[in-house]
Amino acid sequence: YRNERLIINREVVDMKKAIEHEIKILSGLYDVSTVDINISLNRISDFYSDGHRVKAIINNVLSNAIKYKNIKGQSKIDIEVNVMPDSCQIAFKDNGIGIREQYLDRIFEIFYRADENAKGSGLGLYITKNMVQKLGGRIEVTSSYGEGSTFTIILPNLIESNLSAQELHIS
């Protein structure tokens, strides 16, 4: 509800710092020492968006990758960020437990959990999708059960904002 009501605060977002910040926060909640997290950043322009929402999106997707990590071997999460003048693409690729194909089209529904043993309330991906949409972007997922998942988020770069004055508050 708050996501829908709050205006977008446009600011420069340092994606490397934002990801590192969220990893640090999550390391206080989960044992990330057993997860090999790699960040690859290709930036050809500054990225303008709502930093608070971008960090929340990163946190939600990354926390799922950590919660549902590979328990039989070395867990790995590769985060690839491409910042272009018109968009920012963030791909989170893990080798975790994955999602069964029959559940993929429902994972963004409110309170939906793809597994009865799933930890959490079923709100994280729902909230994440809403935030991505509020920013004018989209989120995609591919997954192979038992092999891992890739969540790709594409957000517009608000260098020159095309949002209405009511939706955008320049900080």
Image (cartoon, rainbow, N blue to C red):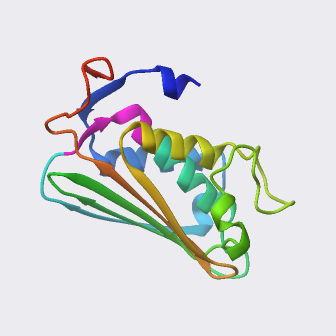
Write the start and end of the magenta stretch as one range.
Answer: 47-54
* Residue 2 location, quadrant: top right
Residue 85 is situated, as x and y percent measured from the top left of the image, at 14, 52
Q: Is residue 163 left or right of residue 91?
A: left
Q: How many marks?
A: 0
Residue placed most toward the observer, 26 or 59: 59
Q: Is residue 120 left or right of residue 46?
A: right
Residue 154 is situated, as x and y percent measured from the top left of the image, at 35, 55
Residue drawn at the location 42% of the way across and 53% of the way down = 138
Q: For the view shown, which residue lies furthest in the right direction?
A: 116
Q: Is residue 75 visible?
A: no
Residue 130 is situated, as x and y percent measured from the top left of the image, at 52, 40
Residue 122 is situated, as x and y percent measured from the top left of the image, at 73, 47
Q: Is residue 127 visible?
A: yes
Q: Is residue 161 above or below residue 67?
A: above
Quadrant containing the N terminus in the rendered view: top right
Residue drawn at the location 26% of the way across and 29% of the way down = 10
Q: Is residue 31 above or below residue 72?
A: above
Residue drawn at the location 57% of the way across and 67% of the way down = 35
Residue drawn at the location 18% of the way across and 51% of the way down = 86
Quadrant containing the C terminus in the rendered view: top left
Q: Is residue 64 magenta?
A: no
Residue placed most toward the observer, 82 or 141: 141
* Residue 44 location, quadrant: bottom left
Q: Is residue 25 above or below residue 95?
A: above
Q: Is residue 45 left or right of residue 91?
A: left
Residue placed most toward the observer, 103 or 18: 103
